[in-house]
Amino acid sequence: MTKETIDWIFVLDTLNFSFWTSSDIEPYLVHYKGKEHRGYWALCAVINRALDEGIPITSPSYYASMTLEQLQYVFRSYTSTPIPLLEQRLKHLHEAGKVLQEKFRGSFVNCIIQCNGSASELLKLITENFSSYRDTATYQNQTVSFYKRAQILIADIWACFEGQSYGSFTDINTLTMFADYRVPQVLNYLKAITYSDKLMELLRSGRELTQGERLEVEIRGCSIWTVELIRKELEELTAQDSAPKMLLNSIIIDFYLWDFATENWDDIQDIPIHRIRTQFY
């Protein structure tokens, strides 16, 4: 439970987006400590590998001015497939490092301290100061805020610190699930949500959606609401006298669904993800 852990998590979630590759090419893979890592776990391996090599990748003073060539080395792949959106990732790091140094004395810890244990205040601070976390769309002339990476940043800190120290938030249950492309897939597999035949056909065709288009916003929005309905149902079940008491919120449900997708990968592959190349998830 250290400041260094917070800075590690902040860099992780600043770069936590867009890992998928088309099925007809090799995946982006990272070889680290004798194992191959892909997706989110490849990102974790990349950060730890860089630190092992003496690269201060979690230091804002370093990544605020690192070059594209330096980041290419950090993200080097075990296959011929590079990490997607590398230049966008560099832009995120430059902005994050600059903001932390100019406004928060060089550490995300000071962002947390400034919010006095409020997850909602921290969410507001993140989205107001770091544009890369400002995950919004316009739907029927209204601004819709998803804030996937901003929320998961707070949730990762809360979970890692087990609700203590820097991870102590009095209103952690105000966070929703983290609307990406993997959780909607598993919700569909579990028949918690259903795609129309037309939508399923479109997704199976491999067409990439564009950021903010109606279908993308509706898939993400319906996924958030589905998890809220699951949470309400579970709260009713656990309110019964015979039910085991447990910590329950949308974060826990999201973590469970994401792990379920990983553990049952072979079974859920027939359900297509909505393909989109975006900096937000």
Image (cartoon, rainbow, N blue to C red):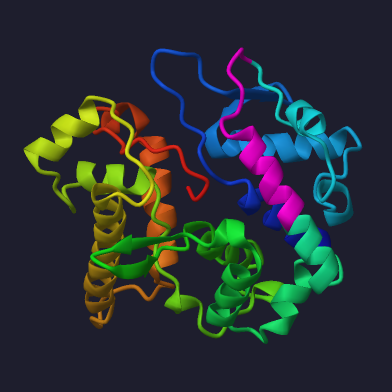
Residue 10, how many percent across, how many down? 69, 57
Residue 203 relative to residue 116: left or right: left
Magenta stretch encompasses residue 85: yes
Residue 243 relative to residue 61: left or right: left
Please say if 221 is above or below 75.
below
Please say if 76 is above or below 146.
above
Residue at image coords 76%, 50%: 94
Residue 48, how many percent across, how many down? 76, 39
Question: Which one is nearer the viewer's eye here, 188 or 162?
Answer: 188
Residue at image coords 30%, 70%: 142
Question: Which one is nearer the viewer's eye here, 10 or 61?
Answer: 61
Please say if 266 is above or below 103.
above
| Residue found farthest to the front | 141
Image quarter where the N terminus lies is: bottom right
How many tags in the picture? 0
Residue 270 relative to residue 78: left or right: left
| Residue found farthest to the left | 197
| Residue found farthest to the right | 54
Using the rendered image of the protein, determine whether residue 165 is visible from the camera's viewpoint.
Answer: no
Query: Image quarter for residue 56?
Result: top right
Residue at image coords 71%, 24%: 76
Residue at image coords 28%, 76%: 235
Magenta stretch encompasses residue 17: no
Using the rendered image of the protein, determine whether residue 111 is visible from the camera's viewpoint.
Answer: yes
Residue 109, how many percent across, how many down? 77, 70
Q: What segment carries the magenta color?
A: 79-95
